[in-house]
Amino acid sequence: MMFGSLRPQAPAPAPSRLTWSWLTLFQIFLAVANFEPDEKGQEFSVIYKWSHRKLKFTPYQSIATHSARDWEAFEVDGEHFLAVANHREGDNHNIDSVIYKWNPATRLFEANQTIATSGAYDWEFFSVGPYSFLVVANTFNGTSTKVHSHLYIRLLGSFQLFQSFPVRPQHEPQLSIIGHCACHMHLLDR
Ligand SMILES: *[C@@H]1O[C@H](CO)[C@@H](O)[C@H](O)[C@H]1NC(C)=O
Ligand SMILES: *[C@@H]1O[C@H](CO)[C@@H](O)[C@H](O)[C@H]1NC(C)=O
């Protein structure tokens, strides 16, 4: 989800661009994807939590990411997840993107599954009846922009590859899920 006009109320470590994801648990969390390494060369994204006392978002958890482009929040069977699109690590675009699951015992998001991606740009979640799907937009594999984007279905506690789609290579693909039950999936070039 992108909310380009919002600005963080808590000081963020000066990323060049931000993407936003809302996750409503018993509280509100906001995941901010950081595109650039900080001054120490470390890359991480920050999950902020709404403070009812301070009436602003305050940093809650830092997660190591690699040129993170998007955070997608979703719920499956009462469990809460965040998927990050890791775009590249240095010059390497063929890296894992990670699905984190909220652990109510530790009260932290913990890695639940890694998925190999190529210049991942966007995650979208949708469900059809009892089935949950995640689709990732891949953009570049190091030599080519003619890479497939992949649709995953959740079976037996993990996401498994369901179908792959070629995306026209000119630009970064944009994913959008139109409608909730009819589920037309659009893979567009900007
Ligand atoms: C991920 O979460 C599911 C439950 O949603 C669990 O069954 C599975 O063991 C978890 N996987 C890892 C690697 O923690
Ligand atoms: C990248 O994709 C191109 C076109 O699909 C393919 O020919 C090439 O082998 C791929 N390279 C890597 C490193 O996966």
Image: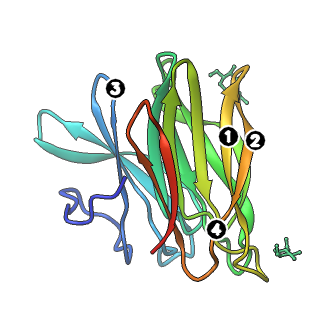
**For mark 1, does the 10 Å Cα neighbourhood hold few (<14), some (14 to 19), or many (20 or more) residues?**
some
Name which residue lies at 37% across and 61% down.
19
- How far apart marks 1 and 4 lie (CA) works out to 16 Å
Number of numbered tags placed on the structure image: 4
Look at discs 4 and 2 and give the one toward the viewer: 4
Residue position for label 2: 161
Q: Say which amino acid is labelled 1.
A: Tyr
Name which residue lies at 76% across and 81% down.
144
Q: Say which amino acid is labelled 4.
A: Val
| Horizontal arrangement in the rendering, residue 85 relative to residue 54 (left or right) | right
Q: Residue 115: which disc?
A: none
Residue position for label 3: 25
Quarter of the view holding residue 161: top right
Percent of width and height locating residue 65: 57, 59
| Horizontal arrangement in the rendering, residue 130 relative to residue 89 (left or right) | left
N-terminal of the pair, mark 3 or mark 4, is 3
- How far apart marks 1 and 3 lie (CA) works out to 24 Å
Residue position for label 4: 167
| Horizontal arrangement in the rendering, residue 37 relative to residue 117 (left or right) | left
